[in-house]
Amino acid sequence: AAYDDALTVVGEGGQFPVALAAAREPPKLSMPRALDVGACLVGDAVREVFVVRNSGGPARFRLLREDDYPSPPTAQRMCASLAMPPFSLAPTEFALGPDESVEVVVDYLPLELGHHERTFLLVCDNCTVEQYAIRGSSEQVMLEMTELNGAPLRGRSVPAALHYESVALGASRGHSLHVRNTSPLPLEFRWELRPAGHLARAGLADVGGDDGTDAYEHGF
């Protein structure tokens, strides 16, 4: 921060003012105005690390919730992270010299579907206060069967079961399935075969392909 003041010199012949000025180089951080952690499955958790570098002068910083400014209820040194559900942010205070950097860690644990955004304040010891935001979106698993044995299923009902005709002992038959991931996240899953009368269950999926579609062969 820059400071301006003046003093008055008094002598036998009168008095005159002397201006006083002081300034220090302000810090310049590379932290984006919005820390975007991307998409996460609802009920899951994701962590993003943002490397923040100071290309200006030395300074100390504190992270505060807007409701806690200017008098937080707890000393910053007692807070390992800044909780703003469904986000948490750490560290809550740090000092950076010229060309030094710090890792700002954002944890995102969404319990509801939708877009989430929270704001916080970055308070510097040069008396400046800047507002920043954290953003993320929670998604659900969305898979669809798009093709069965070469026939597209768009607009048609997806079969609840795959049926195989009788075959001679030692022979085999198969079905070809195309499954598309329509969620914005890569998914991993596995196929599980259950005895008749039990539900078959697929775990979460690695559905790839340029269009989010993978082909699978099921044989009997």
Image: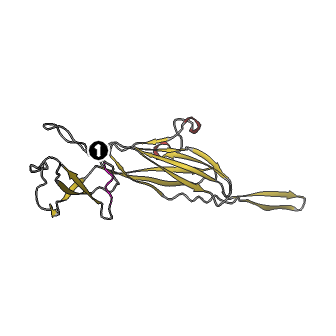
Q: What residue appears at the point 33 percent right and 49 percent down from the top-left corner?
A: 188
Q: Position of residue 26 (x, y in %)?
A: 65, 59
Residue 205 is one of the magenta-drawn residues: yes
Tell me which corner region of the image, top left, top right, bottom left or bottom right, holds residue 194: top left
- The reply, left or right, for residue 217 in relation to residue 151 is right
Report the magenta residues as a range. Answer: 204-208
- Where is mark 1, residue-wise? 203
- The reply, left or right, for residue 170 in relation to residue 51 is left
Question: Which of the two residues, 94 or 65, is positioned nearer the viewer here?
Answer: 94
Q: Position of residue 89 (x, y in %)?
A: 49, 45
Q: What residue appears at the point 55 percent right and 43 percent down from the top-left corner?
A: 92
Question: Which of the two residues, 25 or 33, is positioned nearer the viewer here?
Answer: 33
Residue sitting farthest toward the left: 166
Question: Which of the two residues, 14 or 66, is positioned nearer the viewer here?
Answer: 66
Q: Main secondary structure of the magenta part?
A: loop
Tell me which corner region of the image, top left, top right, bottom left or bottom right, holds residue 207: bottom left
Q: Position of residue 21 (x, y in %)?
A: 74, 60
